[in-house]
């Protein structure tokens, strides 16, 4: 079925009509979908050769514009690769490059990483067989640039490659901060998140967010990352989260635990954000010991961050052991104590026995029966929480 591209061809057609009005109108350019495909040429260095992708500078894929009725249109080409020959109804493939040029250059290292990633996506937990010769199928997908017209595919070529797994050069962040309309001093305080003990890239913090509160985050203060950076946001607390001009916005006010997880994906990091209801609890000797079946004692949250979290009276004396409940993580992964009146998160501390034995007396808080734990959370200008036992 023929279509006239009025938006793009009106100036051309006008010129044709003015200068060639006596010619047969059938000679005027008209667009038609390409149904026969177009030709993708074999890269010169891939013909009859096994390519070691890490030592290959680049591959050059060449083609010519599909026949859209003889009209010179700007065309976009996607280079698609697969371990199969694209004969399946819904082939599994990966796009490794896009270009509006009929000559498309793809670096060997980029193709190497794409092959590794494509294998790992299909074989979770399986080590890539480095130095093994693999058949790699390549085709081009074309369409008129910027328009949903002219979609068609080239022929498929087969090249043989050796890909090598490389440990990612990117590393997970050592710190994450949040800053917002109700965190410490509005849009000034960068509140440090705590690391979940022994789990690189996993951070959490407890914040009070009133109705319509907004915040941003970063791996360092003033980075100002927003909603769009998160691959997914999982609201398990009824916060009603949305994107407001790049800020993470919470419609429903309350106390929340924010859990941010970073996961390396090739040369990038995928971040996810989960909202949990905030929970702080006391366990251990002050709560009657670690006897199996003894429940932890929850602290009572204040109305907002101008008040204090307060525990129930301790049932016995002993060292204070307290924690934040973050999802399904064990209590010792999110434990805290008080160091010089400030909340100190366990993070990577190796505590086999207790704070006093393994970290030192300055980290150990002696709790007496009948006393309580009081915490001021999320209100200080430096973003550090404070507390006392009395």
Image: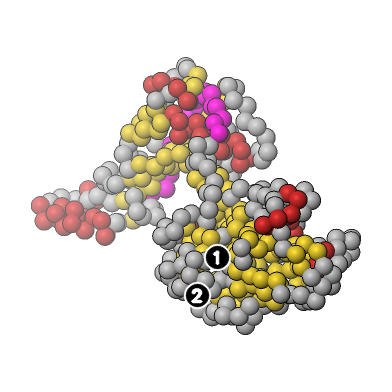
Which quadrant would residue 321 be assigned to in this image? bottom right
Identify the image quadrant of the C terminus. bottom right
Estimate how packed mark 1 is, as few (under 14), some (14 to 19) or many (20 or more) residues with alpha carbons within 10 Å.
some
Marks 2,1: beta carbons within 8 A: no
Helix, strand or loop for disc 1: loop
Position of 13 compared to 364: left or right? left
Estimate how packed mark 2 is, as few (under 14), some (14 to 19) or many (20 or more) residues with alpha carbons within 10 Å.
many
Queried whether the magenta region covers residue 211, the answer comes back as no
Q: Is residue 233 visible?
A: yes
Q: Position of residue 307 (x, y in %)?
A: 60, 80
Helix, strand or loop for disc 2: loop
Q: Say the numbered circle drawn on residue 384.
A: 1
- Name above or below for residue 321 compared with residue 149: below
Query: Which color scheme is applied?
Result: secondary structure
Queried whether the magenta region covers residue 158, the answer comes back as yes
Position of 128 compared to 51: left or right? right
Return the residue found at the far front: 361
Which quadrant would residue 87 be assigned to in this image? top right
Q: Position of residue 230 (x, y in %)?
A: 52, 58
Position of 209 compared to 228: left or right? right
- Name above or below for residue 57 compared with residue 87: above
Image point 46% across, 67% down: which residue? 189
Return the residue found at the far top: 48
Return the residue found at the far bottom: 303
Q: Is residue 228 visible?
A: no
- Name above or below for residue 79 compared with residue 201: above
Say which residue label 2 marks. 182
Distance of label 2 from label 1 (alpha carbons) = 15 Å
Q: Earlier in the sequence, mark 2 or mark 1?
A: 2
Image point 54% across, 49% down: which residue? 174
The residue stretch that appears in magenta: 150-167
């Amino acid at each position: 079925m023929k279509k006239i591209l009025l938006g793009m061809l009106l100036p051309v057609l006008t010129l044709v009509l003015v200068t060639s009005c006596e010619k047969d109108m059938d000679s005027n350019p008209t667009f038609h979908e390409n149904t026969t495909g177009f030709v993708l040429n074999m890269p010169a260095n891939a013909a009859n050769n096994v390519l070691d992708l890490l030592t290959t500078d680049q591959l050059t894929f060449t083609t010519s514009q599909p026949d859209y009725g003889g009209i010179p249109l700007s065309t976009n080409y996607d280079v698609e690769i697969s371990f199969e020959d694209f004969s399946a109804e819904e082939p599994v493939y990966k796009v490794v490059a896009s270009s509006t040029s009929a000559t498309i250059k793809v670096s060997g290292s980029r193709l190497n990483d794409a092959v590794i990633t494509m294998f790992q996506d299909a074989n979770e937990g399986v080590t890539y067989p480095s130095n093994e010769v693999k058949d790699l199928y390549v085709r081009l997908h074309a369409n008129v640039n910027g328009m949903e017209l002219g979609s068609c595919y080239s022929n498929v070529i087969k090249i043989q490659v050796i890909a090598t797994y490389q440990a990612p050069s990117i590393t997970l962040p050592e710190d994450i901060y949040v800053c917002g309309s109700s965190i410490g001093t509005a849009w000034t305080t960068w509140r440090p998140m705590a690391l979940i003990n022994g789990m690189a890239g996993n951070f959490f913090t407890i914040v009070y967010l009133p109705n319509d509160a907004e915040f941003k985050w970063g791996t360092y203060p003033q980075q100002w990352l927003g909603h769009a950076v998160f691959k997914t946001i999982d609201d398990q607390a009824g916060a009603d989260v949305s994107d407001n001009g790049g800020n993470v916005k919470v419609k429903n006010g309350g106390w929340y635990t924010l859990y941010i997880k970073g996961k390396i994906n090739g040369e990038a990091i995928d971040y996810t954000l989960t909202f949990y209801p905030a929970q702080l609890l006391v366990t251990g000797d002050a709560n009657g010991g670690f006897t199996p079946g003894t429940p932890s004692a929850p602290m009572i949250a204040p109305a907002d961050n101008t008040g204090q979290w307060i525990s129930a009276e301790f049932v016995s004396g002993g060292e204070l052991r307290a924690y934040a409940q973050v999802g399904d993580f064990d209590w010792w992964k999110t434990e805290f104590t008080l160091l010089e009146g400030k909340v100190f998160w366990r993070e990577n501390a190796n505590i086999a026995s207790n704070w006093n034995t393994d970290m030192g007396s300055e980290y150990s808080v002696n709790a007496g029966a009948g006393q309580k734990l009081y915490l001021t959370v999320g209100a200080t200008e430096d973003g550090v929480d404070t507390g006392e036992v009395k």
